Image (tube, grey):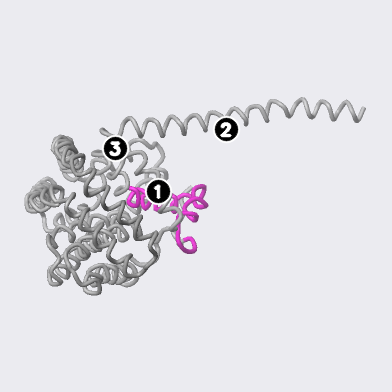
Amino acid sequence: MAQSDTEETVIAAKPVDFSKRISRYLAGIFLLLLVYGLYIGRDFLTPVILAFLLALTLTPIVRFLSKWAVPPALSATILIVVSAGAITILAYVTSGPVSQLVADAPQISAKLQERIHSIRRTVDKAVEATSQIDSATETITDGNVQKVVVAQPGILSRAAGSLLSIGTTLAITLVLSLFLLSSGTLFYEKLIQSFSLMSDKKRALRVVYSVEREISRYLFTITLINAGLGIAVGGGLWLLGIPNAMVWGVAAAVLNFLPYVGALATIVLVAIISLVTFENIVFSLLAPAFVLCCNIVEGQFVTPLLLGRRLELNPVAVFLSISFWSWIWGFVGALLAVPLLVVIKVVCDHFETLKPFGNFLSAQQPSKVPAEE
């Protein structure tokens, strides 16, 4: 009798296990389809997400101006026009130096190889290492000159061809940001209308306002910090005599949206230009050392002071996010990786069921944010 009851229990349990297995398979298929959808829809999704992030960044200014009886539509139009003008001026000013850098890339590469060869010859006197470097230098200098020259127009034509795509993305981003900022409380009114109970309406509105406040504060503050870092780096490199210092200041500001990776890329690029520019090896190390000091001050003092520790992220999660989004959407995805990670973390902090994942994304103990079920 006991054996019969056991068999019946096992048979009754099988459909439950089978149902769970199907749910897991469906969840896996959904994730694969989601990743594939993100990949094939990158041309549409990237300007949309950029527009939402830009709107969140400028929201504090619109709210502040609304307290002085400035209509959201007017303040949004002014902000978008100013942003578009700033982007246009910055692109126009930096286009010349960037084009010159692209044109001088073969010469910079050859000179860099000579400097590296000279440094290695000083450090390492081994004959085999020196002969290998010499042969590599001769191969690049003598054998591949024609290939590099032939490849140059291809690079320039591809860069020129991508300008139209970049311009279209920026135009969509700015126009959509204008509509989002001008709409005022329309989004919240639509959100409230989707709930029937008053308690659900209040809870949804409280969560949305809290998430918007924290994310807009983060994006607005980090944008100002990166702009200040770019000004400091550009000014310091100009004083040190680095050519096109403004370009490297802009690069430092943009790449700093990528924690760790962006700072390292800026230091390496500045080190290459410094080695090519200055004959004295010791003096050529001053420029990358200055950039390193600026990034240390920004990362260890300025950002924690202005943002606090609550929105600090787990470095492992940051690297995984940058790797994933750069794989899906390229360089733009890498720039969006950390802001999107902050958005996910803030949302997770407000829901009890998502708090474990938010705790994984955090760099410290979970923050005391009132959870919403």
The residue carrying mark 2 is 24
Q: Secondary structure at mark 3?
A: helix
Q: Secondary structure at mark 1?
A: helix
**Residue 366 in sight from this viewpoint:** yes
Task: Report the amino acid beneath label 1.
Answer: Ser
Magenta segment, which residues?
Answer: 337-366
- Picture quadrant of residue 257: bottom left
Which label sits in the foreground, 2 or 3? 2
Mark 2 crowd level (few <14, some 14–19, many ≥20, 10 Å Cα): few
Which tag, 1 or 3, sits closer to the chain's start?
A: 3
Circles 2 and 3: CB atoms closer than 8 Å = no
Task: Report the amino acid beneath label 3.
Answer: Lys
**Residue 204 location, x and y as percent?**
38, 45
- The N terminus sits in image quarter: top right
Residue 197 sits inside the magenta stretch: no
Is residue 201 depicted above or below 17 in this figure? below
Foreground residue, 357 or 291? 291
Circles 1 and 2: CB atoms closer than 8 Å = no
Q: Disc 1 to disc 3, how far (Cα)?
A: 31 Å
- Picture quadrant of residue 249: bottom left
Is residue 301 depicted above or below 266 in this figure? below
**Residue 88 location, x and y as percent?**
8, 48
Circles 1 and 3: CB atoms closer than 8 Å = no
Task: Report the amino acid beneath label 2.
Answer: Arg
The residue carrying mark 1 is 321
Residue 357 sits inside the magenta stretch: yes
Q: Is residue 145 left or right of residue 214?
A: left
Q: Secondary structure at mark 2?
A: helix
The residue carrying mark 3 is 190
The label number, if any, that marks residue 151 in the structure image: none
Q: Disc 2 to disc 3, how far (Cα)?
A: 34 Å
Q: Residue lying farthest bottom?
A: 282
